Amino acid sequence: MFTHHRARGIILSAREKRDSDIIFTIFTEDIGKLEVIGRSIRKGGSKLAMGMSLFSFVEIGFVEGRTCNTLTDAVPIRDFREAKKDLGKLSLLYRVSEITLLLVHGQEKDERIFSLLLSSMEKINELSLSRRELKLFLCFFSFHLLYFLGYRMYTKKCVFCKGRIKGDCYFNPKEGGVACKRCFKRKPSGIYLEDVSSLNSFFKSDVSEILSENPAVFLKVLDNYLSFIPEAKGKRFV
């Protein structure tokens, strides 16, 4: 017997299978990451195709089978059309999707990740973002996602001496946090940060607080931090 389900989620990827099928990866509100197959969805006149646009927020119906989940219907909730018209924003949506698919494994509900994805796509759609700000937005999203997945970045105290950090410091990706100047002299490995408060701002809820920062520094922090995370080894995001 097949079990019928309904779920709301964001379409993160769509890959073709056989002549006319598409496998969708969706991060859902109540289930987590989910794969469903749209049978014959690439054939002309498919009603399902209209509701399954990439990077859209949708409500779907699907049947849970023995080997795969089969899509039965789709109702679009929000398409984020304005973001998809802008090449820079569309590129950012792909990057957000890429890093989510890379780091999130298994089918497990996580309301924080779902909320992060949905709110990020809403802001990308609504805000006017320069090329520099698009890069900062990627860092903002990625640092939050890593935090929710348990890869906490220690920024309050030195990862070596545990002394409180104030002002400039060095981010040590191997240790997953910042080192004070004194400890850096003993172990000179890290990325210089003029002010630790700038890095702390990336973990606040309002993305506008970080849009004046230098993206090169924080993209370097992100890329180096990811290099020490097993799922991301061998991948580059900068």
Image: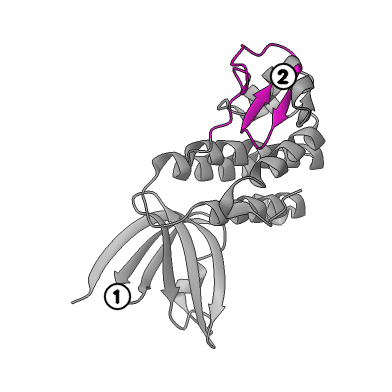
Taking the spot 79% from the left edge, 26% from the top edge, the residue there is 192
Q: Would you place residue 43 above or below residue 186 in this image?
A: below
Please tell me which residue lies in front, 119 or 27.
Answer: 27
Please tell me which residue lies in front, 197 or 57.
Answer: 197
Q: Would you place residue 221 above or below residue 95 in this image?
A: above
Spot occupied by residue 18 in the image (x, y as percentages of width and height): 52, 86
* Circle 2 residue: 183
Spot occupied by residue 209 in the image (x, y as percentages of width and height): 67, 24
For mark 1, give the secondary structure. loop
Crowding near pointer 2: few (<14 within 10 Å), some, many (20+)? some
Taking the spot 71% from the left edge, 17% from the top edge, the residue there is 180
Which-is-in-front pick, marks 1 and 2?
2
Of pointers 1 and 2, the one earlier in the residue sequence: 1
Q: Is residue 231 left or right of residue 218?
A: left
Please tell me which residue lies in front, 207 or 225.
Answer: 225
Q: Quadrant of the N terminus?
A: bottom left
Would you say residue 174 sits in the magenta stretch?
A: yes
Spot occupied by residue 127 in the image (x, y as percentages of width and height): 67, 37
Displayed quadrant of residue 162: top right
Q: CA distance from mark 1 to mark 2?
A: 56 Å
Spot occupied by residue 234 in the image (x, y as percentages of width and height): 68, 57
Tag 1: residue type? Gly
Q: Would you place residue 91 above or below residue 214 in this image?
A: below
Magenta stretch? Answer: 152-181
Crowding near pointer 1: few (<14 within 10 Å), some, many (20+)? few
Taking the spot 67% from the left edge, 42% from the top edge, the residue there is 138
Residue most extreme to the bottom: 19
Residue 79 appears in the figure: no
